[in-house]
Image (cartoon, rainbow, N blue to C red):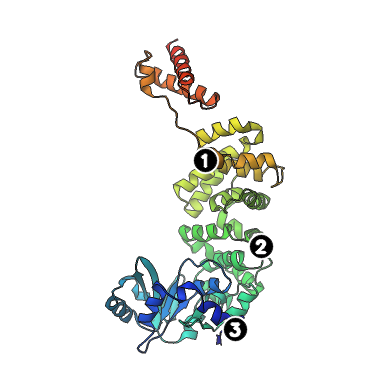
């Protein structure tokens, strides 16, 4: 056990907001007393130690689930038995959900699922987790407990399995993807832990057992990691990317996409990065939709990128770019522009591509101002002719630069009406 360590760990964690007030402290006040102990565990501790954002806070306790429910209800909090058979209760305090899990040890494991026994042994609970950096826990006073070497690994930015990597992977084959995802997020950008990598390669057949939803979740998180590119290179060299994505990886385009996103100040987008990595034709989008069970919106974005990235370049000019934004919408236009840029011969410093890629952030497409009534009063009857007139007018309005003046719109409507009548 290591308490403190990693510099001024106890003091630094003691100063963070969620250990000094709010829902977490109120929950610990209820659970960490009267013969029971409770600590914050896992990712919140890990991220707080390295000054990364904390999105979820999980609590572990020696109290059995029924006692957790009794105590939190007595305190006026809401208890939701989200996984009570495995010791997990979600406690809602002022609208903030906090997951509370009773200390446990695995009696029997079979893939993702395990038969567990509740206990009071903090080291045993830590040792059943996946990686050392995820097995840290912290008490209310900011003291960090480390039973697996996680503090040293966190200091070295090393992702390492707890115990035998092969055994950890056999318990849940998703840990192969999690190993690479955590390396892409928390690693130094170089080679991953050698023992962990070897175990991932040896256990690669187990990836076929995983649900597509779980593959999607981990893959999307991996793609936006700070060190996603070197991680993907390792995965590709090891033959793992093909097993997940089912097709060729375009690592150069992926690298360029990360560069152009940074150049224009955009946050990493997992769908756009997936398109850069694995999509060149519409069939690629369909394959990924099936393999990763993507959402329909994600499929639509990838399919649109596959159709449009070759057809866009700064040569379209600003007027052409605005026309595309109107036709495609700002999201699809930006997807096309960034992927076209990433697969072009230009660098991330190219001013023309920069201007095109950011056009949708600088210009909002107006709504087409002419209505069916504008053509009916010009003698166009309802039916195919009316639709033809409106489409012709819309095309003319776009070609003329989206005019808003009444006279310009009237001329466009008159011309379209005359044309449909011929």
Residue marked by disc 1: 330
Q: Between marks 3 and 1, how big is the CA–CA gap?
A: 49 Å
Looking at the rendered image, the disc whose residue lies closer to the viewer, 3 or 2, is: 3
Residue 194 x, y percent position in the rendering: 66, 72
Q: Position of residue 122 (x, y in %)?
A: 47, 85
Q: CA distance from mark 3 to mark 2?
A: 32 Å
Please indicate whether residue 421 sits to the left or right of residue 159 in the image. left
Q: Secondary structure at mark 1?
A: helix
Please say if 351 is above or below 145.
Answer: above
* Disc 2 to disc 1, C-alpha distance: 34 Å
Quadrant of res 370: top left
Labels 3 and 1 touching (C-beta < 8 A):
no
The earlier-in-sequence mark between 3 and 1 is 3
Quarter that holds the N terminus: bottom right
Tell me the number on the disc at residue 5: 3
Residue 234, labelled with which disc? 2
Q: Earlier in the sequence, mark 2 or mark 1?
A: 2
- Percent x, y for residue 190? 69, 66
Residue at position x 56%, y 46% from top?
284
Quadrant housing residue 382: top left
Q: Dot 3, how many residues are within 10 Å of its Cα: few (below 14), some (14-19), or many (20+)? A: some
Query: Disc 2 vs disc 1: which is toward the camera?
Result: 1
Relative image position of residue 130 (x, y in whole percent)? 53, 74
């Amino acid at each position: 056990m290591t308490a403190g360590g990693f510099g001024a760990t106890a003091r630094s964690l003691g100063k963070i907001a969620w250990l000094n007030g709010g829902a977490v402290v109120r929950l610990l006040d209820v659970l960490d007393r009267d013969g029971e102990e409770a600590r914050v565990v896992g990712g919140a501790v890990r991220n707080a130690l390295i000054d990364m954002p904390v999105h979820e806070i999980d609590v572990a306790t020696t109290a059995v689930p029924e006692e957790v429910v009794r105590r939190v209800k007595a305190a006026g909090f809401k208890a939701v038995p989200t996984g009570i058979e495995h010791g997990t209760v979600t406690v809602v305090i002022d609208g903030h959900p906090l997951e509370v899990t009773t200390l446990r040890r695995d009696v029997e494991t079979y893939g993702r699922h395990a038969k567990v026994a509740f206990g009071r042994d903090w080291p045993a609970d830590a040792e059943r987790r996946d990686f050392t950096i995820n097995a840290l826990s912290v008490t209310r006073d900011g003291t960090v407990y480390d039973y697996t070497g996680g503090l040293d690994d966190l200091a070295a930015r090393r992702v390492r399995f707890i115990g035998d990597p092969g055994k950890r992977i056999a318990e849940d084959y998703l840990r192969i993807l999690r190993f690479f995802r955590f390396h892409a997020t928390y690693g130094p950008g170089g080679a991953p832990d050698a023992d962990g990598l070897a175990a991932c390669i040896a256990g690669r057949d187990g990836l076929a057992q995983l649900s597509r939803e779980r593959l999607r979740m981990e893959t999307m998180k991996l793609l936006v990691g700070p060190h996603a590119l070197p991680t993907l290179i390792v995965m590709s060299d090891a033959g793992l990317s093909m097993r997940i994505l089912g097709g060729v990886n375009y690592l150069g385009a992926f690298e360029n996409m990360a560069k152009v996103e940074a150049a224009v100040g955009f946050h990493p987008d997992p769908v756009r990065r997936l398109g850069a990595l694995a999509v060149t034709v519409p069939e690629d989008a369909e394959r990924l939709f099936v393999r990763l069970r993507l959402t329909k919106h994600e499929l639509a974005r990838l399919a649109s990128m596959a159709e449009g990235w070759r057809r866009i370049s700064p040569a379209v000019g600003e007027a052409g770019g605005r026309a595309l934004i109107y036709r495609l919408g700002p999201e699809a236009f930006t997807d096309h522009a960034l992927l076209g840029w990433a697969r072009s011969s230009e660098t991330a410093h190219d001013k023309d591509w920069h201007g095109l890629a950011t056009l949708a952030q600088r210009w909002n497409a107006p709504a087409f101002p002419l209505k069916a009534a504008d053509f009916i009063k010009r003698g166009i009857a309802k039916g195919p002719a009316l639709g033809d007139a409106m489409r012709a007018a819309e095309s003319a309005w776009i070609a003329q630069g989206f005019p808003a003046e009444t006279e310009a719109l009237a001329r466009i409507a008159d011309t379209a009406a005359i044309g449909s009548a011929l």
